[in-house]
Amino acid sequence: MIANEIKRKIRNIVGLENAIDSTEECFGYSYDSSFVPMSPENIPDLVVIPSTTEEISAVMAIANEYGIPVTPRGTASGRTGGSIPVCGGISLALHRMTKIIEFDEGNMMITVEAGVRTIDVYNFCAERGLFFPPDPASWKYATIGGNVGENAGGMRAVKYGVTSNYVMGLEVVLADGSIINTGGKAIKNVTGYNLTQLFTGSEGTLCVITKVLLRLIPMPKARNTLQLMFPSLDNACKTIHKMLISGVVPAAAELMDKISIQAVARHRKLEIDSSIEACVILEIDGETNADLEKQAKQIQAIANEFRVLEVRIAASQQEVDDIWSIRRGLSSAIGAMAPNRFGEDISVPRNAFPETVGLIRKIAEKYNLTIAVYGHAGDGNIHPSVLCDLSKPGEEQRVHDAVNEIFSAALSVGGTLSGEHGIGITKRPHITKALGEAGVNALQMVKQSFDPKGILNPNKIW
Ligand SMILES: Cc1cc2nc3c(=O)[nH]c(=O)nc-3n(C[C@H](O)[C@H](O)[C@H](O)COP(=O)(O)OP(=O)(O)OC[C@H]3O[C@@H](n4cnc5c(N)ncnc54)[C@H](O)[C@@H]3O)c2cc1C
């Protein structure tokens, strides 16, 4: 509960219409795109929608004074419950902060407010010949603040890295309302601790990100897409591995197992050859079409060594879009296969991809569950999707146990709990298994020093 007197103070800062407390409207801020079930307990007491850093600073100062929880929120496309206000209090929604503040062509950098959508940054830069590579599949609606909050990855991570590789500096509001700037345009910068990287991936628990300075790179002049079908998942993985060690680095290397392929086929009413066990979609890029042809030939030669069944090289933009729409629509195609689905996001060393998929297959058998596996094979980020029907007796427990074992499998091969979706609420129970008591304790000490009252996104990560 937030006292009316405090609400009045906040309304004086952001305006009456930007501090909402009706249950109906607040309900819309009580869930995200994770599998956390909706619950009245997660409805915030107040939704605050600021438009400036100064407003956020003033709101945080009040929240800190009265010990009110504050949960930063982009557009709630997060997959782990990060923006769910599990302790009530304030949902701080940044979707009005959508200004592109500066495009610095000379330094190849852009400064944007945290509420700008990822695709808008990409398009703005692309129109000016520069490239912002991180491309989470949710880029049409996710915000840059949310991308930094989760250190989002995307399909192009194999060649171009993830969000943190492009964040040069941040403007943030700390729990007590103070505003600080971290990093900057200097490429080499070792002045003090690297707070920019500490805040990147901090899931709204250390600060509110208000502005982001991003590094850009030249836009590749030529791009194409290939689709390869394999008789086994192992052969598909070996092809990607051999490509990478031979120096043929695709911009994206996405892999889908048979269950995923069947989901797409069903969704699109397509016939698929039954001998196909794995599909790989590659994006290649370079300076000229000749570069692309050379890469495509090298890839084809490597794939032939691993008995590729079919190679499709896109001959038009229409075909490129067609192939990528398969991957971009995969999540909904898989979701349509069962009443319930739990999508996970483990990350393993690249060469452990086939072994991990083998372990997931065994887990699926053990618990008599269907688990579709797809992911960013080029960087070892696997998204196992457990398909289930929670209305069946005992199913929920089996899914829970299976997911638990998937995390253990990832850790057993030297991997980790999350490649890009963060920990949020859904992976909290597993964090100690991944980091150990002392590791979690170190995180808690960092949290304590930035947010001694524990008001920023409480009950997340551990
Ligand atoms: C269909 C689908 C596909 C997806 N594909 C990908 C993918 O390919 N790669 C990937 O990495 N993710 C993916 N995601 C997950 C999600 O889109 C990303 O995590 C994204 O970065 C979240 O952005 P958001 O604006 O929605 O943030 P939210 O979900 O609103 O918040 C995410 C976290 O960041 C914090 N946060 C948000 N804004 C701020 C801020 N300004 N300051 C401080 N903390 C903040 C929140 O408190 C929360 O902890 C996908 C999600 C969906 C639904």
Image: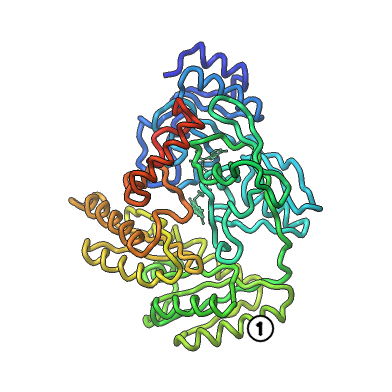
Which residue is outermost to the top? Answer: 5
Rendering quarter of residue 343:
bottom left
Is 184 left or right of 95, judged from the image as shown? Answer: right
Residue 215 in view (yes/no) = yes
Q: How many marks?
A: 1
Residue 142 in view (yes/no) = no
The N terminus - image quarter: top left
Residue 323 in the image: state x and y as whole percent.
55, 70
Residue 311 or residue 191, whichever sits in front: 191
The amino acid pointed to by label 1 is Lys
Q: Residue at x 70, y 39 (%)?
A: 99
Rendering quarter of residue 127:
bottom right
User: From the viewer's perspective, is residue 140 above or below residue 365?
Assistant: above
Q: Residue at x 55, y 27 (%)?
A: 48
Q: Residue at x 60, y 31 (%)?
A: 173
Residue 51 in the image: state x and y as whole percent.
65, 30
Which residue is outermost to the right? Answer: 106
User: From the viewer's perspective, is residue 143 above or below residue 241?
Assistant: above
Is 130 left or right of 251, judged from the image as shown? Answer: right
Residue 125 or residue 216, whichever sits in front: 216
Residue 105 in the image: state x and y as whole percent.
80, 52
The residue pinned by badge 1 equals: 294
Q: Residues within 10 Å of mark 1 (few under 14, many from 20)?
A: few
Colour setup of the view: rainbow
Rendering quarter of residue 221:
bottom right
Residue 114 in the image: state x and y as whole percent.
62, 40
Residue 150 or residue 348, whichever sits in front: 348
The C terminus - image quarter: top left
Give the SS element for disc 1: helix
Is 277 left or right of 186, judged from the image as shown? Answer: left
Q: Residue at x 54, y 77 (%)?
A: 245
